[in-house]
């Protein structure tokens, strides 16, 4: 499942990030994917001090985000890397590597892009994810993020004007299987509805459909074994 996380970074964090971005010394993105025929972008070296400070800000913001904790059930998160796309740059259709090369390596169950500049700053550059025959395109506000399964085929469409800046990371989840993870998301939503109390008709209907979904999908899963 694909989840948008609005305003993960608050205004003060976005301000700090905006001041740090011009200090990054970008490299050719092919450094970490030398075999890639489709990657044409710039990325910050891991040891870049401005990249490291942005990584800390973004990490803190992601870790405190309750939606991310529910959607990803994160076990480990790779250090974020700031990427930059100028006109003509793109990252064509690909699937992310299974292991992020850290020490120890981190299995990528979920991929995450945190948009760091305004969508009005550039044309093209949508993060586009294939879902069967559909293509879902995302250009989010600065400070918002998208979480999507690392198993998906996706691309960053070519930039035709301006500059696109984002931070990217990968998460290893306590629950590798995305179907099982979605059941946890539904349980969390049901718990939140109950905890909020004051059962209005809409809330009651939502709770009902969540419970029916959980029952049917758990039955589907367990009736095979
Ligand atoms: O910049 C993005 O939104 C994602 C780029 C990407 O797909 C990747 O770096 O693997
Ligand atoms: Fe990717």
Image (cartoon, grey):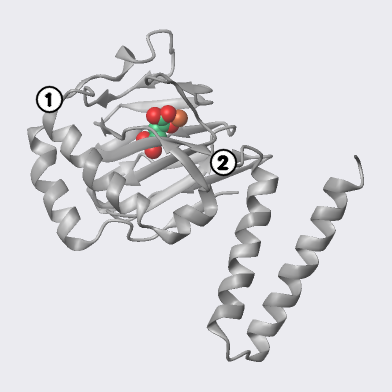
Give me the residue at 40% from left, 26% from top: 91
Q: Nearer the viewer, residue 199 or 40?
A: 199
Look at the image and tell me whether residue 215 can be seen: yes
User: What residue is shown at x 38% (from left), y 42% (from top)?
Assistant: 113
Element on which disc 2 rests:
loop
Of the pair 112 and 105, the residue shown nearer to us: 105
- Please say if the residues under marks 1 and 2 sit with CB atoms less than 8 Å apart: no
Q: Report the residue marked by disc 1.
A: 25
Along the viewing direction, whichever of 209 and 128 lies nearer the viewer: 209
Q: Is residue 68 above or below residue 99?
A: below
Left or right: 219 as drawn, with respect to 119: right
> Which image quarter has ligand 1?
top left
Residue beneath label 2, please?
174
Horizontal and vertical percent position of residue 145? 38, 50
Q: Where 149 sits versus 43, above or below? A: below
Q: From the viewer's perspective, is 75 left or right of 221?
A: left
Dot in front, 1 or 2: 2
- Separation (CA) of disc 1 from disc 2: 35 Å
Relative to 198, say whether 33 is above or below: above
Q: What element carries label 1?
A: loop
Residue for point 20% across, 41% down: 54
Q: Residues within 10 Å of mark 2 (few under 14, many from 20)?
A: few
């Amino acid at each position: 499942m694909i989840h948008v996380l609005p305003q993960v970074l608050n205004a003060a964090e976005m301000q700090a990030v905006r001041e740090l971005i011009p200090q990054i010394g970008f490299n050719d993105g092919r450094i970490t994917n030398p075999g890639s025929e489709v990657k044409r972008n710039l990325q910050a070296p891991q040891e870049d001090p401005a990249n490291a400070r942005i990584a800390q800000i973004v990490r803190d913001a992601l870790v405190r985000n309750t939606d991310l904790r529910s959607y990803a059930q994160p076990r480990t998160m790779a250090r974020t890397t700031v990427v930059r796309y100028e006109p003509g740059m793109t990252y064509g259709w690909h699937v992310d590597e299974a292991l992020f090369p850290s020490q120890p390596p981190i299995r990528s169950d979920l991929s995450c892009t945190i948009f760091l500049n305004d969508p009005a700053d550039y044309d093209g550059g949508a993060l586009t994810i294939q879902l069967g025959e559909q293509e879902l395109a995302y250009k989010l506000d600065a400070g918002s993020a998208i979480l999507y399964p690392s198993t998906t085929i996706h691309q960053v469409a070519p930039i035709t004007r301006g500059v696109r800046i984002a931070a990217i990371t990968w998460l290893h989840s306590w629950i590798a299987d995305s179907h099982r993870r979605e059941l946890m998301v539904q349980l969390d939503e049901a718990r939140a509805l109950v905890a909020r109390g004051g059962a209005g008709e809409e809330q009651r209907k939502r709770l009902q459909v969540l419970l029916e979904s959980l029952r049917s999908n758990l039955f589907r899963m367990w009736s095979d074994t």
